[in-house]
Amino acid sequence: MGPLFNASDEWSFVIALVIGIAFGYLLESAGFSSSRKLAGVFYGYDFVVLQVFFTAAITAAIGLLFFEYFGWIDLSDIWVNRFYTGSAILGGALMGIGFVIGGFCPGTSACASAIGKIDAMLFLGGFIIGVILFDAFYPLYAGFYKAGNQGPVKIYESLGMDREVFLLLFVIVAIASFVATGYIQQKISHKSKKY
Amino acid sequence: MEEIKVQQHTPRKYMNPYLAGVLLGLVILFSFYLTREGLGASGAFKRGVAKVEQIIIPAHVNSEKSAFYHYVKNGEDPLKNRLVYMIIGVFIGGFLSGAINHRLKLKLEHSPKITSKTRAIAAVIGGAIFGIGSAFGRGCTSGAGLDGMAVLATSGFVVVGMIFGVGYLVAWFFRKLWI
């Protein structure tokens, strides 16, 4: 039964390299190597980010549930990020601002740098500066960073729902957003751009 | 003959987003199945910074004053981690797709309404804000967001909700950069 390896096994390093290649290949193939295409999600002229992102999330979430039903994976042994209320909210907000100004996120900027996008290389340079700044002034907000630890809590627990019911709702909301964004994108298509 | 030449140099069309999404979802699924963890991009860069700090300012990173203390505790090498191999893979995979689809080109992409210089400055500033954000968020769009949603973690949904929610809130102020 899965997971087959521990994340710190050396085999995991080899697997991570292969998974990284697939990840980078798919990001580039879907058009995530273009900042103007990525930023489109915020201005209504291109929703590919939302479409790829939510399709991937529901595919993986449904897959994990089926793997558990078939007895192939022990979900209690899977890594789940802890939820630190204030830090997660502030971090998400800053990432939203950084995304709109910079036009990338770390994974997409890495794959765009690989095909020669100079703006992506500059974004990555900025990203590293940000990480250094965070570390340099860390004592100022270490308390805030570690406050409000709710542990590896799940969204359906936070909402007091059944796991399966939540997942069904998530899928419905995702599909509704695909339909809505398809409609909006058509409406704004006169602004359609070449990247 | 000429037509063939033109075709060879024209970038191919992007993959259908839903097909790419399903394939990416399967990659995440197998990552969890095989290694118990999902995707990640920011972790490798944080570890890279920790590695440099370990060499040039060891007293800082080996203390509670550093956010990366846990990467180097007990003399550990911060680069001996799967996320470092994963980001190397992302560069290779991105390059392969770019090569196969004729999209390899050194280029600073920007809206025709702004100069290259404006775009360059915005990319660095946006990157820096994103870097600070992903440190607070304990991961970026992939590690905190995508993985988090796949395992139905509250942290993942909150981070993704904030990225897109705040992104839409501030988009109007930065519209000149894009449209």
Image (cartoon, coloured by chain):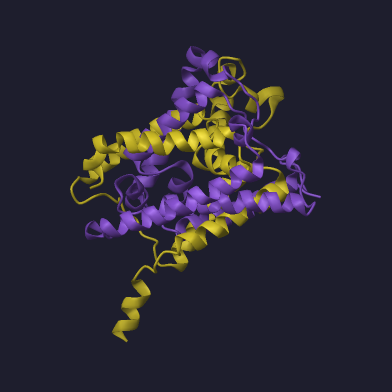
Chain colours: A purple, B yellow
Marker count (numbered): 0
B42 left or right, relative to A179: right
A56 left or right, relative to B110: right
A43 left or right, relative to B141: left
Which percent across, then down, holds residue B79?
Answer: 62, 37
**Point 58% across, 39% down: residue:** B148
A68 left or right, relative to A97: right
Between B126 and B81, the one nearer to me in the picture: B126
Asked if A18 appears above or below B2 in the picture, the reply is above
Q: Quadrant of residue B40?
A: top right
Given the current orientation, which residue lies at the most extreme left position?
B113
Q: Is residue A129 visible?
A: no
**Point 33% across, 50% down: residue:** A40
Which percent across, then down, holds residue A55?
Answer: 52, 54
Asked if B53 appears above or below B26 in the picture, the reply is above
Which percent across, then down, holds residue A186?
Answer: 30, 60
Q: Quadrant of residue A187?
A: bottom left
**Quadrant for the N terminus of chain B in the image:** bottom left
Which percent across, then down, holds residue A90?
Answer: 45, 25
Q: Quadrant of residue B120?
A: top left
Q: Is residue B168 visible?
A: yes
